[in-house]
Image (cartoon, rainbow, N blue to C red):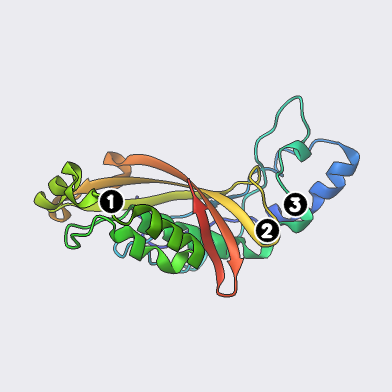
Amino acid sequence: MKGRKLKKTIGIAVLAALLSSCSMFASDEPAEEDDRNLVAEVTPDQSQPGEVEGPAEGEGDIGGDLSVGEDEDHGHHDLYAGDPDEFPRDDVDEVVDVASVFWQRLYFRTYTNRDPLQWIGAIKETTTAEYHQALVDEFSGTQAQQAPSWVSFLANELTTDVIVYDVVVALDEPFDRDNMSVWVHGAVADQRPDVMADVSIVGADVSTLVTLTRTGDGWRVSGHR
């Protein structure tokens, strides 16, 4: 993808849709087609994986709508995994930024750092202390350093190119004022830095559900799968 700056379209109409959903619950009437899908589209800066730039002028306008999909046999209230009044609508912008940075650092590797677990240190500032420690405990002592794939990665002097396509709020996952989840969709590709092709063409598509929690330092990742 050509764009290097963070580009987001998160609708103000979305927030109105969340508010209107309360009256929708009372009336049981279906929402209009335009009041669906909370989507934040992100095109991060690839030159510095994990660094997020603000939107360029004209790119930060809020647009988009609210949805988690619709089942013909069920109303929208069956698809929300939380009370719309509790949805932290004012924090969506920050949540998208943190989730995007976390995702990029999670999948980025470089042969110049010979530690196959380099990602654990890279994601630390985007995660809660508890979740980071859990990852350290889970992966410390593994034999990743001797894994054939990592040995080959180093021998071929590869770097993992990463790109985020979009970040989508997962309203069908539990949420409240201090917790929410998003789907991060992107692509990754192990390439030689001097002959990198467009990762959006040669990369493997990867989707990750990222859960975030409000902390004293802002929103941080508290789980992913």
Q: In the shown orientation, is residue 100 left or right of residue 12? A: left
Element type where label 1 sits in the image: loop
Q: Is residue 24 visible?
A: yes
Task: Give the residue type that dot 2 points to.
Answer: Ile
- 45 or 87, which is in the foreground? 87
Q: Separation of disc 1 and disc 2 at Cα?
A: 46 Å
- Name the spot of residue 185 as percent of width and height, x first: 45, 45
Select label 1 or label 2 by which is in front: 1
Disc nearer the start of the sequence (2/3) = 2
Query: Which of the 4 image quadrants contains residue 50?
Result: bottom left
Task: Give the residue type that dot 1 points to.
Answer: Thr
Task: Give the residue type that dot 3 points to.
Answer: Leu
- 88 or 123, which is in the foreground? 123
Q: Separation of disc 1 and disc 3 at Cα?
A: 45 Å
Element type where label 2 sits in the image: helix
Identify the residue at image location x=47%, y=69%: 54
Q: Which residue is mark 1?
A: 142
Q: Separation of disc 2 and disc 3 at Cα?
A: 10 Å
- Name the spot of residue 84 as percent of width and height, x first: 76, 52
Q: Which residue is mark 3?
A: 18
Q: Is residue 128 visible?
A: no
Query: Which of the 4 image quadrants contains residue 113?
Result: bottom left
Q: In the shown orientation, is residue 200 left or right of residue 60? A: left
- Name the spot of residue 73 as percent of width and height, x first: 76, 25
- 184 or 151, which is in the foreground? 151
Disc nearer the start of the sequence (1/3) = 3
